[in-house]
């Protein structure tokens, strides 16, 4: 009796190789970035080859019950073609069979599991890697800011290699001094390789020791690097390049250039920079005040160093993007980002900061898109860039792309509750309330006091009519961070407790400055259309950073037919000439 065949593990499609385990597509050893839906559509065509698949069959295979149409399928096919470098007029991969559907034209070879390779390094198109926090062996190293800074820098340098998927620093911090084994940590983070190591600073000398371990606990490589503190950037880039060689990743010329740093640092300014970013990472008002002061001192000591400017830019944007804050921080963030890029165009974080300012304050959609693309070209593993880029796609009505970017952010930073919460927020505004609740529960399992997760959870529960649960979640949001308190007024209004909601709205209006978006949501929930519209008009005048999403907001749908609402949307000059009505969705008008 013949043995049953094993399930496919990979495919060869023309000159492409597809690894089903890692969901990676590559050509000549170089990974091709395909978002989830693009990958799923390609796999459906591969498995159906050489047959023609109808749009209905592709919808069932790729979108699994979600409501899409044939135009959505056609646009997704074009995105796959673009990623593969295919031409619809002379297709090497996907052909349109008019009136019927699509078929794969390239030859397909199915590959099945073989015996494990002897090498401990997985032979995959894109390797997933985590850099654990470095142990600080320096004398008097109780503060730990120096090792933290080098940890962040090593992640940043490695992330410049597109063939690597590098987990963000936020998600590795919980494993500092963890009792878990390296294979257990690799399993939790979903990576193939783990880097651990130490840093020793003695006076103006630095030693960085690192070792690379595979997920099966096999030792891959280890090395130590010594140098003068002024050459710390060169040491960091040497470590990153050595890691890529150890895992047999071939860098492109651009990647190699970005990963090579010869610039020396002013040791006093660099120390202030590291201390400043450490204070900012504490995410407290006092930490921000101290961090900003230290970074400004660093720029004064060495105006030629782009790193403090880049970190200042992100910090000012964070302040501006906080509900209830003055939006004057955004121009300061943009100025700092431009200063950083004037000194070094290769800093992805500075491009990200500029993208954020252009998206949330200047409302310059083409320039925001350009800055996001530049950031991700330099650092494809920059989770924050993917997370913020999702919101720009939503403005354009590219809902599927928004979810893809949001999902990438979560994959790259799986223990960052904010990105998980934002993913659920997208579900909330698309009226998938149960999915929104699920994501908030995941975020709260990571941080039970996360105010954004409690806020979105409250709104999703309110939309489902689960008012007592919603009020409890909103109360939790308000007690953990007052700037997210307006969810309580919103939930009280939907629960029919209008008297309490009106009192709450009056208290919100006395804040200095009042938050027009928050007040518009509460008054919309109360049915006070004139008041809600008035606050939206005020939001436009004060450049409230969420205003471009007023059409996407589920809780403003009762206002969308109002002429005053449409006028604010017209003044926002949203992409695609959207002047009113609900958010255009991918496959309809984008």
Image (tube, rainbow, N blue to C red):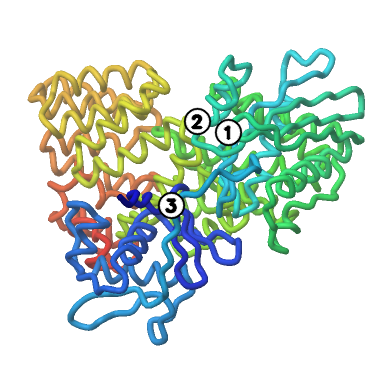
Which of the 4 image quarters holds residue 69? bottom left
Q: Is residue 316 visible?
A: yes
**Left or right, 28 with reference to 96:** right
Q: Real-space Cα distance between discs 3 and 1?
A: 19 Å
Q: Residue furthest front?
A: 1
Mark 1–mark 2 distance (CA, rounded to whole Å): 7 Å
- Identify residue for label 3: 9
Structural crowding at the residue carrying mark 1, measured as other residues with C-alpha within 10 Å and reported as few (<14), some (14–19) or many (≥20): many
Residue displayed at 50% across by 41% down: 412
Question: Do callouts 3 and 1 mark residues in contact (Cβ within 8 Å)?
Answer: no
- Does 156 appear above or below 31? above
Whichever of labels 3 and 2 marks the residue nearer the N terminus, that label is 3
**For the point 17% across and 52% down, which residue is it?**
65
Q: Which mark is residue 187?
A: 2
Residue 327, given in percent of the width and then of the height, sits at 47, 41
Identify residue for label 1. 215
């Amino acid at each position: 009796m013949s043995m049953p065949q094993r399930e496919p593990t990979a495919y060869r499609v023309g000159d492409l190789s597809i690894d089903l385990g890692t969901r990676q597509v590559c050509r000549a050893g170089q990974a091709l970035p395909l978002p989830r839906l693009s990958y799923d559509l390609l796999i459906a065509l591969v498995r159906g080859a050489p047959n023609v698949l109808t749009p209905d069959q592709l919808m069932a295979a790729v979108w699994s019950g979600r409501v899409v149409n044939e135009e959505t399928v056609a646009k997704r096919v074009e995105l796959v073609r673009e990623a593969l470098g295919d031409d619809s007029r002379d297709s090497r991969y996907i052909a349109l069979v008019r009136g019927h559907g699509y078929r794969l034209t390239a030859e397909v070879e199915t590959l099945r599991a073989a015996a494990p390779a002897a090498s401990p390094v997985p032979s995959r198109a894109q390797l997933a890697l985590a850099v654990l926090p470095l142990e600080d062996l320096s004398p008097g190293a109780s503060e730990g800011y120096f090792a933290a800074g080098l940890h962040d820098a090593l992640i940043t340098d490695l992330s410049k290699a597109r063939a690597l998927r590098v987990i963000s620093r936020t998600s590795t911090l919980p494993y500092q001094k963890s009792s878990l084994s390296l294979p257990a940590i690799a399993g939790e983070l979903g990576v193939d390789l783990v880097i651990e190591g130490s840093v020793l600073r003695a006076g103006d000398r630095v030693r960085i020791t690192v070792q690379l371990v595979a997920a099966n606990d096999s030792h891959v490589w280890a090395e130590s690097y010594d140098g003068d503190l002024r050459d710390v950037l060169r040491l960091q880039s040497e470590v990153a390049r050595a890691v890529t060689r150890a895992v047999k990743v071939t860098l492109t010329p651009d990647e190699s250039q970005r990963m090579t740093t010869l610039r020396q640092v002013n040791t006093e300014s660099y120390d202030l920079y590291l201390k400043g970013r450490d204070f900012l990472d504490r995410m407290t008002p006092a930490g921000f005040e101290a961090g900003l002061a230290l970074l400004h001192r660093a720029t004064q000591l060495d105006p030629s160093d782009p790193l403090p400017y880049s970190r200042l830019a992100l910090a000012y944007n964070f302040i501006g993007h906080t509900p209830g804050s003055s939006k004057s921080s955004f121009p300061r963030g943009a100025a700092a980002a431009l200063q950083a890029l004037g000194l070094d165009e290769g800093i992805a974080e500075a491009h990200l900061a500029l993208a954020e300012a252009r998206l949330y304050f200047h409302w310059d959609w083409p320039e925001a898109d350009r800055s996001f693309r530049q950031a991700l070209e330099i650092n494809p593993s920059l989770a924050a860039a993917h997370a913020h880029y999702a919101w720009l796609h939503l403005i354009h009505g590219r809902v599927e792309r928004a979810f893809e970017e949001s999902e990438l952010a979560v994959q790259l930073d799986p223990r960052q509750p904010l990105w998980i919460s934002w993913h659920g927020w997208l579900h909330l505004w698309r009226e998938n309330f149960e999915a929104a609740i699920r994501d908030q529960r995941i975020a709260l399992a990571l941080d039970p006091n996360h105010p954004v997760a409690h806020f979105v959870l409250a709104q999703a529960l309110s939309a489902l009519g689960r008012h007592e649960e919603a009020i409890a979640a909103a109360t939790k949001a308000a007690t953990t961070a007052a700037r997210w308190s307006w969810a309580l007024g919103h939930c009280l209004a939907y629960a029919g407790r209008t008297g309490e909601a009106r009192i709450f709205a009056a208290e919100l209006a006395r804040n200095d400055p009042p938050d027009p978006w928050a007040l518009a949501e509460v008054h919309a929930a109360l049915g006070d259309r004139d008041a809600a519209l008035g606050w939206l008009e005020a939001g436009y005048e004060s450049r409230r950073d969420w205003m471009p999403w007023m059409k996407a907001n589920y809780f403003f749908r009762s206002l969308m037919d109002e002429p005053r609402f449409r006028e604010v949307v017209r003044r926002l000059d949203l992409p695609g000439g959207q002047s009113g009505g609900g958010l255009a969705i991918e496959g309809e008008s984008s």
